[in-house]
């Protein structure tokens, strides 16, 4: 079982595999808010989410980015669109993405401190309050005993690292709990959680009995309805009828392992992503360009 070592700011350090492996996660700090680095015995390693990133998400992300740009220009149309507006709009998707990440990180931080028994005050930010209250509601409706939070995992066999949100007994079963601040429960989360579980089972020799995905809305019902109305207005301009969007959900909890074979299926998919990412790194344009130079 992994053993935590006295941490420094933004750093999680664990002794694993009987002391033969030291894993360090260098996380965000005030001076380095974007830092996200894993080191294993002094060597930098690739994380689970980076491997999964090989999957193409452009079908959803490109329309989202273009819609942000469209709405931004329409809002400024009457005032008169300037060259500055055009360049500002180009970076709007990065700004919105970081805002969402900040909300998620604040919610994760509150939950982590709550699990550690630090009795944190309720956050002031509306979206973070939504996340926190939804988590507490789920916890109170299930028999949850927290075992660890924000624990680093590493697979010696397949050489990948990551960080688990929560390890807990849920209704008597040893489970991984992963919390997402997102608009949906995407199948990439299945791969991510399977990789975490399998790496921890490899190191600890324990057997997990399931995974929970918890999705927390990052917007209010009013904001959701406004966003869906904009989407239907855009469909109308294209001559299409209204789409029947699902009702607003502030919270969603999904148990991934009703079928005993789901864990192996999802882990196999993750390993396929890892293989593809490593192949791309070795054969891609920039890899070949570097070799030529």
Image (tube, rainbow, N blue to C red):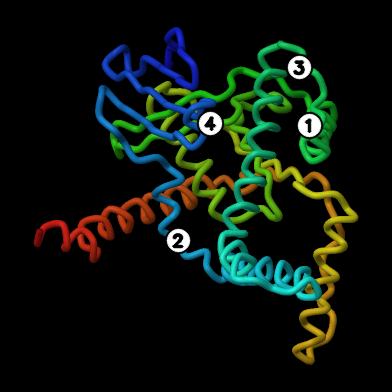
As drawn, the label of residue 60 is none
Whole-Å distance between the Cαs marked 3 and 2?
Answer: 37 Å
Q: Residues within 10 Å of mark 2 (few under 14, many from 20)?
A: few
Q: Which residue is mark 4?
A: 164
Of 37 and 164, which appears nearest the observer? Answer: 37
Q: Residues within 10 Å of mark 4 (few under 14, many from 20)?
A: many
Mark 1 and mark 2 in contact (Cβ < 8 Å)?
no
| Viewer-side label of 1, 4 | 1
Q: Which residue is mark 3?
A: 120
Quadrant assignment, res 251: top right
Q: Which residue is mark 1?
A: 132
Question: What secondary structure is marked by label 4?
Answer: strand
Sequence-wise, the earlier of marks 1 and 4 is 1
Residue drawn at the location 49% of the way across and 37% of the way down: 34
Q: Is residue 282 left or right of residue 169?
A: left
Residue drawn at the location 60% of the way across and 65% of the way down: 84
Sequence-wise, the earlier of marks 2 and 1 is 2
Residue 91 picture location, percent across and down: 56, 60
| Viewer-side label of 4, 3 | 3
Residue 32 picture location, percent across and down: 47, 31
Residue drawn at the location 61% of the way across and 55% of the way down: 186
> Which residue appears farthest toward the bottom when viewing the image?
239
Whole-Å distance between the Cαs marked 1 and 3?
Answer: 11 Å
Q: Which residue is mark 2?
A: 55
Question: What secondary structure is marked by label 1?
Answer: helix
Sequence-wise, the earlier of marks 4 and 3 is 3
């Amino acid at each position: 079982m992994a053993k935590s070592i006295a941490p420094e700011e933004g750093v999680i350090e664990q002794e694993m595999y009987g002391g033969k492996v030291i894993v360090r996660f260098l996380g965000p700090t005030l001076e380095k808010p974007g830092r996200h680095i894993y080191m294993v015995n002094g060597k930098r390693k690739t994380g689970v989410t980076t491997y999964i990133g090989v999957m193409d998400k452009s079908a959803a992300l490109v329309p989202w980015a273009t819609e942000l740009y469209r709405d931004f220009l329409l809002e400024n149309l009457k005032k008169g669109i300037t060259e500055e507006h055009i360049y500002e709009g180009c970076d709007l998707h990065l700004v919105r993405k970081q805002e969402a990440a900040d909300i998620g990180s604040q919610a994760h931080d509150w939950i982590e401190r709550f699990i550690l028994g630090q009795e944190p005050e309720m956050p002031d930010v509306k979206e973070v309050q939504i996340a926190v209250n939804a988590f507490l509601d789920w916890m109170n409706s299930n028999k949850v005993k927290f075992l660890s939070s924000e624990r680093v995992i590493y697979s010696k066999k397949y050489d990948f690292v990551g960080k688990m949100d929560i390890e807990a007994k849920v209704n008597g079963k040893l489970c991984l709990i992963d919390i997402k601040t997102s608009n949906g429960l995407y199948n990439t989360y299945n791969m991510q959680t399977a990789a975490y579980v399998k790496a921890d089972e490899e190191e600890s020799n324990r057997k997990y009995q399931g995974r929970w995905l918890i999705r927390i809305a990052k917007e209010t019902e009013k904001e959701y309805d406004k966003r869906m109305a904009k989407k239907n207005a855009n469909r109308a301009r294209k001559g299409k009828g209204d789409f029947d969007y699902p009702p607003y959900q502030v919270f969603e909890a999904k148990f991934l392992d009703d079928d005993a074979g789901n864990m192996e299926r999802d882990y196999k998919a993750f390993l396929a992503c890892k293989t593809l990412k490593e192949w791309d790194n070795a054969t891609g344009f920039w890899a070949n360009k570097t070799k030529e130079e």
